[in-house]
Image (cartoon, grey):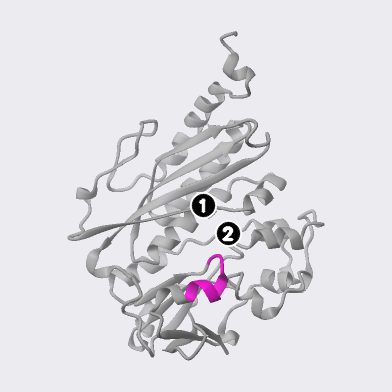
Amino acid sequence: MSKNAYAQSGVDVEAGYEVVERIKKHVARTERLGVMGSLGGFGGMFDLTQLDVKEPVLISGTDGVGTKLMLAIQYDKHDTIGQDCVAMCVNDIIAAGAEPLYFLDYIATGKNEPAKLEQVVAGVAEGCVQAGCGLIGGETAEMPGMYGQDDYDLAGFAVGVAEKSQIIDGSKVAEGDVLLGLASSGIHSNGYSLVRRIFADYTGEEVLPELEGKKLKEVLLEPTRIYVQSVLPLVKEGLVNGIAHITGGGFIENVPRMFADHLAAEIVESHIPVLPIFKALEKYGQINHDEMFEIFNMGIGLMMAVKPEHVARIKELLDEPVYEIGRIVKKDSASVVMK
């Protein structure tokens, strides 16, 4: 067999080297205190001694992007999907009170196209910049036969640190707490198997009446919002009792994860800033209205349970709309009650 045997099997080693060179400038954007070493080693390194944390607890999260990737491939737009991957991980760990420290990604593809993969990693780097965490490593795997030539998958994980006394585990949430919501940027990164079915016959170029002048593909690929910069100062000031990242399962599955079983969330639906895309999904998909809250974030990507006396201070600290959408009550039957 010739010395080009690996290339003949569909794996381009030289393209892999090119990807590494292309992404170095994007990785450099994510440098932060504690990051050690350089890209290309066998493991990413982070120096915890650089941090001013007395009782450090490491909190980690891992996720992918799901079938939203299929729309990125369909529309040939790859520069934002990386932010989605970062967001799904760092939003989970900020919900536990952790500051994201570093992120690693994994990209598997059928054919290594350096320019396209650079776009993906550029999106990952942008997400890391927004989250304040370092991109300290990753892996690109070219697997012809496992994936089609145009296909790729993206996953990653983040590690954060919390002061042991500031961990948010739901134990502090109490009856009478106010529920505050922060807006989502759109669908974020869940429910896309349903989204794709609803819009299966659309090209993405359409401007639906509900979408306020935006093309459908722009709205569907809007990257997931990262909440770290907004929420971390509130956590460090001790203003938050519980946090729910509203992802797959919508309100019904995620909100109860931030409080004990004897409590419930009473949510006033009219206080939720429902985004146009959710109205379109409900209409064109003929989805039962109540079921929408079991699938999507509906315009609220992150929810916090806080003491009533902390509401004014939180609104003062946050340079964005803060929605008072309900309160914590004693559980009667359901864990989430929509009013």
Residue at point 41%, 72% (across, down): 243
Q: Is residue 162 above or below residue 78?
A: below
The quarter of the image holding the N terminus is top right
The quarter of the image holding the C terminus is bottom right
How far separated are the C-alphas under marks 2 and 1? 8 Å
Label 1 sits on a secondary structure element that is: helix
Image spot of residue 64 (x, y percent): 53, 51
Can residue 318 be seen in this snapshot?
Answer: no
**Numbered circle sitting on residue 189:** 2
Q: Is residue 79 above or below residue 223?
A: above
Image spot of residue 120 (x, y percent): 56, 43
Label 2 sits on a secondary structure element that is: loop
Q: Is residue 47 above or below residue 227?
A: above
Which comes sooner in the sequence, label 2 or label 1?
1
Mark 2 touching mark 1, by CB under 8 A?
Answer: yes
Disc 2 residue type (three-letter): Ser
Which segment is the magenta one?
247-255
**Numbered circle sitting on residue 48:** none
Can residue 31 be seen in this snapshot?
Answer: yes
Disc 1 residue type (three-letter): Cys
Q: Is residue 169 above or below residue 36?
A: below
**In this figure, which residue is indicated by the disc labeled 1?**
85
- Tell me if residue 195 is in the magenta stretch: no
Which residue is outermost to the top?
2
